[in-house]
Every structure is written in C-alpha cells, then in structure tokens.
C-alpha cells in the first residue's frame, strides 16, 4: 500500500465500524466515529454495561453482548480497539481472523515482540493496521516540523519533551494499569509514548536509550518517575520525561543552531533566536477525528496510514529500551529490539 494523505479519495459510503472499549478515551473515539460522515458506528462492546449503554445512547449503534457478535458480523468492516495494552494482541488476532481492518490505541502492545506479532498478523491477513498516535497531529507539532524542514532552526542538535500528570496517584488495584506487566515503565507506556512517536516524527529514528525509573509516590506496583536520554540516528541527543505523580506538565523543545522552537502548555509555541522570542499562534485541532477519517479513507483507497505498524513499533521500542536500560544499568540499542 502507498502512504495515505488528506487528499485521498473520499469513501463512497461510510465505513462500518465497531468499537471495543467505549469508556474513558474510548468515548472520544465514539464521538469521532459518530460525528464523521465517513464512518458509521455499528456496534460497541464493553464488559462494563454502563459504558456500553452510554455509548449506544449518545453515539448510536447496538450493544454487542459479547465480542463474538462483532467478529461474526460480516457487515462490520473494521474495529477500533480502545482497550488495555495487554489485550491488544489477542484482539488483533481475532480481528484479523474475521477479516476486519484494525485501529488500535497507542501503545501498540506491552512489548515489542507482541507488537511485531500484531504487525505480522495484519500483514498475513492483508488488513490495514493503524495506531492511535495522535500527538504528532497537533498543530503545534506540525508547525515545529515545518520550521525544521524549511531550515528556520538550522541543524537540530537536541530535543526535550515531557508529558506528565498526577493520574498515577488515583490508580486502584482493580485498574489494569496497577500491574507492571500491563504498563511497563508506568507513565512511559501511557504518556511518554506520545513523545516517543512525536520526537521520531520530527527528528528521525532513535538509535539508543539510557534511562531510569523509580516508584516514589504511587500505591500501584508501577514506577511513577521516569527519565530517558535518547540518541537519534542523526547524532542529535534528547531527553524524554514522563511522571505519574505531579501536576500537569507538557512540553516539547527543539534546539537548533539557528533557532529554538518551544511549546509548553503554559506559554504556547515560541520561536527563539539571538534577536529574541516570537509567539507563533496555534489552534487546538481535532486530532481524534482526523485519525478516524484517515482510517476510513485508507480502507476505501487501499493506502497506508501515517502511523502504521512500523511507526508504532519504533515508539514502542523506545519505551521497552528505557525499561530494559533501567533494569540493566546500561544503554540499550533499538536494533537489539527491532532486529
């Protein structure tokens, strides 16, 4: 398949979708499916009855009594998996066996090995795989990319990124995120993976990772403070932070020989040169809707999405390398994981 684009042909009829996991962020996926003329929400499934009922009431479609109803329905063309990390592989295998295209939330899986098995299952079945790394689609990241590509920044030699909040303090034992095996690196898997993708979108592949994780404040059996140092194949260096026990903190900085571009949730997007700072206006675009509509276009046109298996594996490999680096006390090569 060739890479998809916003100019790809419009679907001739809505793509018929089913949603697994309509609670939490899954509601955003349901909203996007419902609001787009390119997609139709046919069914949803959740083991939590109230989540499924709320989805049916607010966004239409029927409630599936069990996953088999979705796998066995020939009218359902594709599935959106907004489900816990550790069940992605099993669900993708079911979807592939039933001939349904697949959109899965980030991270692709809990391990690179499982992620590679997901990619292989989709390729063997000839099905589209798209992964929900929506952060790279934000207008601020797109504008950073444009400044990098038009030479405004000069040579980018370093990058800094952090995505943190205090959500780890409220995780309860019944939550799937409580267990380390389900959420490797704690906030690295859930928050840092956004920037593991965005930074590689901006600067190219990461070659090696040196990292530390600590469990300092949360009750759950996961780390909540994480720091990773990145070396990109280009030679640029980077910092990636993700913490689960601090007030909201989000930023991305690119540091170049001619200019720096910095986005912070507190200050917005700034371009810095020796002459001073310039504020760059940015809007909040609907990245979730953009993803769902690209998914539909790619299904109809037979094109590849911006974020497919390869891109998702590269982001996942950064997270796994960071976890292994902490365990082994040394840098970990991405090639060790991806082969």
Image (cartoon, rainbow, N blue to C red):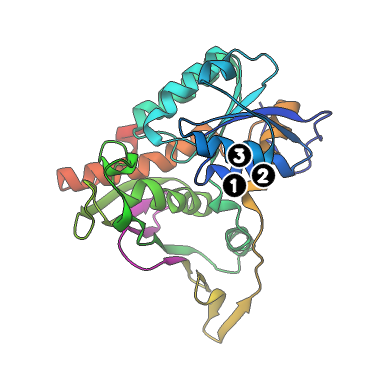
* Along the viewing direction, whichever of 49 and 225 lies nearer the viewer: 49
* Along the viewing direction, whichever of 149 and 139 lies nearer the viewer: 139
Q: Which x, y percent locates residue 47?
A: 46, 30
Task: Name the front one of labels 1 and 3.
Answer: 3
Q: CA distance from mark 1 to mark 3?
A: 10 Å
Residue wearing tag 2: 32
Residue wearing tag 1: 28
Contact check, label 1 and label 2, Cβ < 8 Å: yes
Which residues fall within the magenta stretch? 229-251
Compared to residue 225, the image places residue 93 above or below, namely: above
Q: Residue at x 81, y 35 (%)?
A: 10
Q: Which x, y percent locates residue 35?
A: 73, 44
Mark 1 is surrounded, within 10 Å at the Cα level, by few (under 14), some (14 to 19) or many (20 or more) other residues, namely some
What element does badge 3 sit on?
Answer: helix
Residue wearing tag 3: 55
- Residue at the far bottom: name it: 275
Task: Name the front one of labels 3 and 2.
Answer: 3
Could you tell whether 151 is left or right of 196 in the image?
A: right
Q: Residue at x 61, y 79 (%)?
A: 279
Quarter holding the N terminus is top right
């Amino acid at each position: 398949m060739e890479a998809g684009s916003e100019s790809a042909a419009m679907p001739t009829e809505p793509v018929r979708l089913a949603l697994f996991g309509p609670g939490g962020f899954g509601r955003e996926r349901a909203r996007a499916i419902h609001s787009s003329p390119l997609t139709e929400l046919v069914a949803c499934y959740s083991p939590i009855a109230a989540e499924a009922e709320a989805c049916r009431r607010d966004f239409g479609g029927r409630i599936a009594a069990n996953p088999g109803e979705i796998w066995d329905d020939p009218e359902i063309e594709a599935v959106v998996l907004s489900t816990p990390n550790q069940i992605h592989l099993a669900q993708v295998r079911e979807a592939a066996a039933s001939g349904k295209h697949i959109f899965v939330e980030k991270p692709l899986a809990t391990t690179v090995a499982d992620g590679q098995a997901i990619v292989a299952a989709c390729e063997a079945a000839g099905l589209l795989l798209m992964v929900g790394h929506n952060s790279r689609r934000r207008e601020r990241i797109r504008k950073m990319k444009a400044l990098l590509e038009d030479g405004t920044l000069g040579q980018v030699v370093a990058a800094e990124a952090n995505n943190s909040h205090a959500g780890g303090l409220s995780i309860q034992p019944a939550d799937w995120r409580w267990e380390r095996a389900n959420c490797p690196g704690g906030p690295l898997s859930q928050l840092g993976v956004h920037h593991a993708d965005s930074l590689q979108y901006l600067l190219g592949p990461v070659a090696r990772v040196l990292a530390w994780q600590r469990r300092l404040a949360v009750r759950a059996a996961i780390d909540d403070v994480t720091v990773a140092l990145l070396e990109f194949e280009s030679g640029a260096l980077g910092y990636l932070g993700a913490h689960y026990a601090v007030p909201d903190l989000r930023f991305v900085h690119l540091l170049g020989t001619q200019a720096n571009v910095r986005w912070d949730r507190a200050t917005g997007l700034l371009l810095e040169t020796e002459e001073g700072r310039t504020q760059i206006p940015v809007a909040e675009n609907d990245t979730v809707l953009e993803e769902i509509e690209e998914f539909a276009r790619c299904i109809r046109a037979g094109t590849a999405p911006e974020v497919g298996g390869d891109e998702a594996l590269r982001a996942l490999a950064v997270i796994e390398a960071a976890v292994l680096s902490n365990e082994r006390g040394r840098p970990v090569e991405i090639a060790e994981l991806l082969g």
